[in-house]
Image (cartoon, rainbow, N blue to C red):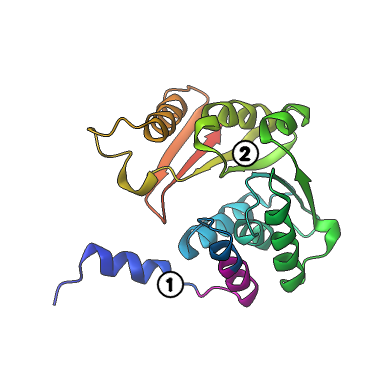
Amino acid sequence: MTNTRADMTLYAEHYVPETEASQVARHASIDLGLAPVSVATAKTLTLLARLLDAKAVVEVGTGAGVSALALLAGMSRDGILTSIDNEAEHQMAAKEALREGGIAHTKYRLIAGEALSVLPRLTDSAYDLAFIDGTFIEYPEYLEEALRIVRPGGLVILHHALLGGKIADETNFDDDTMIVRDALEAAKGMDNLTTALIPVGDGLLVALKG
């Protein structure tokens, strides 16, 4: 019997099992009405952070901590994750997940606030990786700020890059789709970026700053 694309996607999603702490964070995300990164997406984030031996990472959109756990799992032992979210309830859930995962509080700083107010205060070229999982309408501005703060040789990663299939639907012109699509096109057109659109979970745009 030939496996369908859905079968292959399901297999890939669960190829590497999720940790107990990540499961706790995922359930908390669902309870809060959030859409956390998929299991395979989380493992991809861990892999990319490890490939960079990332010491300084910025995350826009803490949620309940699923992606934070994934990033920290791949980062250098002396690495620090800076995660930004404007919802205090989300960051409280993330703190619980990080505690559940045995992550020392010195390994991360959670900043409560609007990302577009916080990002401009971060230092140019000081970060190895920036992961964007925030408000869709602000994706172009996130991308601009992320490219400023990430060092040459670092990565900028945008979550929801396929937006549940909407991006590939040429007849879809709703606001979120158009804005995310514009951000993807902007990244693809930049001479100093090497980009790939990875169809894992809801899609990751991965851009290497050259």
Q: Residue at x 35, y 49 (%)?
A: 164
Which badge, 1 or 2, comes first in the chain's sequence? 1
Residue ID for mark 1: 14
Point out the frontmost of discs 1 and 2.
1
Residue type at mark 1? Answer: His
Is residue 59 shown above or below 63?
above
Residue density around tag 1, few if under 14, some if 14–19, many if 20 or more, within 10 Å: few
- Check the picture and name the quadrant holding the N terminus: bottom left
Looking at the image, which is closer to me, 137 or 79?
A: 137
What secondary structure is marked by label 1?
loop
Residue type at mark 2? Answer: Gly
Is residue 5 shown above or below 156?
below
Q: Residue at x 46, y 29 (%)?
A: 183
Left or right of 198 in this view: 35: right
Is residue 189 shown above or below 32?
above
Residue density around tag 2, few if under 14, some if 14–19, many if 20 or more, within 10 Å: many
Please state the horizontal and vertical placement of residue 111, each as a whole percent of the image: 77, 44
**Residue farthest toward the right in the current orientation of the protein:** 106
What secondary structure is marked by label 2?
strand
Q: Main secondary structure of the magenta part?
A: helix
Residue ID for mark 2: 154
Q: Is residue 117 magenta?
A: no
User: Picture quarter containing residue 181?
Assistant: top left
Left or right of 110 in this view: 180: left
User: Picture quarter containing residue 188?
Assistant: top left
Q: Residue at x 58, y 26 (%)?
A: 141
Please state the horizontal and vertical placement of residue 70, each as a whole percent of the image: 61, 60
Can residue 37 be seen here?
Answer: yes
Find residue 152 and name its label.
none
Instruction: Tell me the distance, in whole angstroms, between the alpha carbons under discs 1 and 2.
Output: 28 Å
Q: Which range is magenta?
A: 17-27
